[in-house]
Image (cartoon, rainbow, N blue to C red):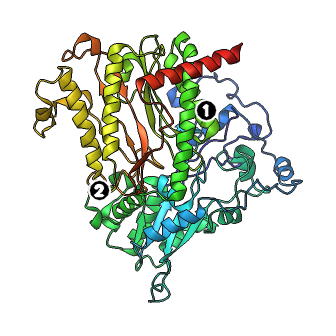
Amino acid sequence: MNEPASQGANTPGSRPASRTVDPTAGQSANQASDQPAGPPPGQPGLQTADQSSNQPLAERGDNRSRRPASKAFREFMARDWGAIAAAPGATERLEGADPAAERRSRLASQFPDDRLVFPAGQLRTRSNDTDYRFRPHSAFAHLTGLGADQEPEAVLVLEPRVDGDQAPPAGAPTHEGVLYIRPPATRDTPEFYSDSRSGEFWVGRRPSLSEIAAQTGLRTEHLDQLRDALAKDAGQVQLRVIREADQAVTEMVEQVRAEAGTPFAQLSQSPSQKPAQDPSQDPDARLAEAASEARLVKDAYEIAQMRLAVAATIQGFERVVQALPRAIAAERGERVVEADFETGARVDGNGTGYETIAAAGPHATTLHWIKNNGPVRPGDLLLLDAGVEVDSLYTADITRTLPVSGRYSDVQRRVWEAVVDAADAAFAAARPGNLFRDVHDAAMRVIAERLEEWGLLPVTAAQSLSPDGQQHRRWMVHGTSHHLGLDVHDCAQARQELYLDGRLEPGMVFTIEPGLYFKPEDLAVPQEYRGIGCRCEDDILITAEGAENLSAALPRRAQAIESWMASVQSAVRQGDR
């Protein structure tokens, strides 16, 4: 990997410094002239703590390499560049742009006089001066239509349309969307070749303001103008921001509020001290709540993206079955499973929507086993919980518990079929007008009944299902369902009355994922159950007629899974001949 320039320190309330370095900064005369630098004559190469260099820590990342610093180099770098070729589709309107505009209009109408701020977020450091791939905040993606790795540091501002004291006409949009982004550096500036986060010599071609405007239908402005835009009429216009998305933007909003003396300026002194008041008393919490609830019902574009994500995920499960012989042979077979799924996710989409759970044998009794460092043994079960995130950032979330050898043992089959029975009961309850909680309750009735039939409950199923009982939950402590979309646990900040106690509506997409988990050390069950963990998870779309299982193409019943696995592995063997 090439070595980037060092990262500057952030100033509170300002935009975080990019990893841009003046080619002459922090370099001594002999460094600038490309001569070796060493300790002064007569001094040892190692120094005591008291003799340590006074070179600022922020500059020491440059000690490992040398950059040209001469005037001749800078002048030569600034000339003789041809026109940059336009990227394919650079000025084509995104498929998700129009649906995003409709979402902006609906959300903004709840705050007709307020300025709403939705940051994309910053690049996040993985270690030292290397970053994770960028993923924008989900609210930003939902309201702009931008996906994949677009666009670090960008900020969407929904500006209230006020002409003097006149509000917009009835039915007209209440806000104008303005997207503030950092444009690509021109070739005659050092940023082009010295900024490892945004310089095109480091990260490749970046879109211009006009290209982003064409893609999204939003007015675009230089990021440097953001603070002035936020401060405009700040004493008369309420500012609301998605606090968690970008600390620097949140601090900027706080500064503007404080300078304007707005009544909410005292709510929080820093993003890490986010107030816990009722959202009705906290402008930012109310915005986060509204942005989350706006995703409860998916539009046609979002549903189409969910179908793509599910289809890619099912392909990933097939790749895993193909890879099982290699997983069995490997010391850390779970890593083989993880790697094969995630390779396909990166090829077919943006990556995985969450860390892959590849839990074999007793690891399947750990709900979120993501270490994936264990063996995959014949005779064991493999619980694979995985989802492909497509380029639009919508993710699937599917789980199957597969017999590594291709056939379930009697007790494995018994547990798996019980879990699928519970899923089918939950599916039957997923109907428009029913409560979201009804889906979970239906699954729990089956789980409790099966545990009673097997003699594992210390009470009757009816007693266990009562609020004062709940003994069956020893073996399934998680919920049955969660909303799904841009986040694997989507709509997480929605109010309880709209989520858990909400009515199911056409366009809602959520999971159904009952399970049973018998820990290896669980003395409350017979030996034959210990170490078995099963979960069956499908992605469900509520329709006007009922519900559609988006992931129905992936076999669910034990016999169907066995036949499917045999067919997939037979095709691999034939291809190897």
Q: Which amino acid does label 2 sit on?
A: Gly
Q: Quadrant of residue 330?
A: top right
Count the numbered circles shown: 2
Query: How many residues crowd around disc 1 within 10 Å: few (fewer than 14), some, or many (20 or more)?
Result: many
- Label 1 or label 2, whichever lies nearer to me, is 2
Q: Quadrant of the N terminus?
A: top right
Which residue is label 2 attached to?
502
Q: Mark 1 points at which residue?
A: 344
Image position, residue 186 (x, y; %): 76, 58
Residue for point 40% across, 26% down = 369
Observer able to see residue 474: no
Circle 2: element type: loop
User: Whole-Å distance between the Cαs marked 1 and 2?
Assistant: 36 Å
The C terminus is located in which quarter? top right
Residues tagged 1 and 2 counted as in contact (Cβ below 8 A): no
The image quarter in which residue 40 lies: top right
Q: What residue type is labelled 1?
A: Gly
Q: x, y percentage for residue 44?
A: 63, 21
Question: At numbered mark 1, what does the secondary structure look like: helix, strand or loop?
Answer: helix
Q: Residue at x 26, y 48 (%)?
A: 437
Crowding near the residue tagged with mark 2, few <14, some 14–19, many ≥20 C-alpha atoms within 10 Å: some
Horizontal and vertical percent for residue 297? 42, 58
In front: 523, or 368?
Answer: 523
